[in-house]
Amino acid sequence: MAQPQQRKIWVAGNWKMNQSREEIRRFFESLKQNWTPTEKVAVALFPTALGIAQAQESSKGMGIQIGTQNAHWEKSGAYTGELSGPLLKEAGVNLCLVGHSERRQYFGETNQTVHLRTKSLLSQGLHVMACIGETRPERESGNTNNILQAQLEALLMAGDDSFRTQACERLVIAYEPVWAIGTGLTATPAQAEETHLWIRNWLTKSLGPSSESISILYGGSIKTESFGELLNCPSVDGGLIGGASLKASDFGSLVRTAISLA
Ligand code: PEP
């Protein structure tokens, strides 16, 4: 795990299309029972758009960032079903997930639209967590780094230098091997470290030393039992967690693991 003074360690939960308002209220009621706000670790949760207000209300004082799972690059317009940067800011949301593999797989998200969303949201002062990752056939055919390179180039090398400066200030990358998401298959610490180190080296080579501040999170079937050994990898700066973030006891335990290792 990286030194906290270099970059942030994150524990982020993606709730996908889960958690009613009542379930959110109960989640935080339970999480609060064993919770001390911390500066050591950045904690974030991504509820559905309809759950944002409840999550903000129920998590007051806990130091948890509440983000959205997606947002459009235009500020307003005829884009049915989308959210925009100004709407997020008005709702007190400062963080947005983009490019999750489920959006790429089911909703036509491409490397180019991930770039457009990221560039626009960063330029509006928001923080962005952008997901990248290879599928199983891509890993098995030895193409992991080629795929990641194409995703990173599309994400960061289009656009100008001021965009890349903003990225160094407010972007987080979540490396999520698609074969590990929701499948119960977690990358081994050795696989995670090898890939995170490759991403770190790409960032340094392409964006220079300021990219040291970009945290690289691992995501893919993280469990309370496996998180510690992933965090012990020097190039892993935290986790993006789906299934195991839905239960307050598990999420609290993941946060405590990160605090104990930070
Ligand atoms: C995710 O949705 O980003 C994720 C990593 O899910 P899971 O932990 O359930 O694999």
Image (tube, rainbow, N blue to C red):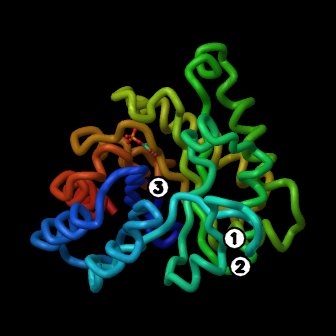
In this orientation, which residue lies closer to the viewer: 48 or 3? Answer: 48
Mark with earlier residue (1, 3): 1
Q: Is the residue indicated by label 2 positioned so its CB lies within 8 Å of ligand 1? A: no
Instruction: Give the CA distance from mark 1 to mark 2.
Output: 5 Å
Q: Secondary structure at mark 1?
A: helix
**Nearer the viewer's eye, disc 1 or disc 3?**
1
The residue tagged 3 is: 237
- Checking the image for residue 124, the label placed there is 2
- Checking the image for residue 121, the label placed there is 1
Q: Position of residue 213 (x, y in %)?
A: 60, 67
Q: Position of residue 164 (x, y in %)?
A: 78, 66
What residue do we see at 64% from left, 44% from top? Answer: 199
Please say if 60 is above or below 133: below
Q: Position of residue 205 (x, y in %)?
A: 78, 51
Question: In the rendered image, which quarter is residue 251 located in?
Answer: bottom left
- What is the number of callouts on the image? 3
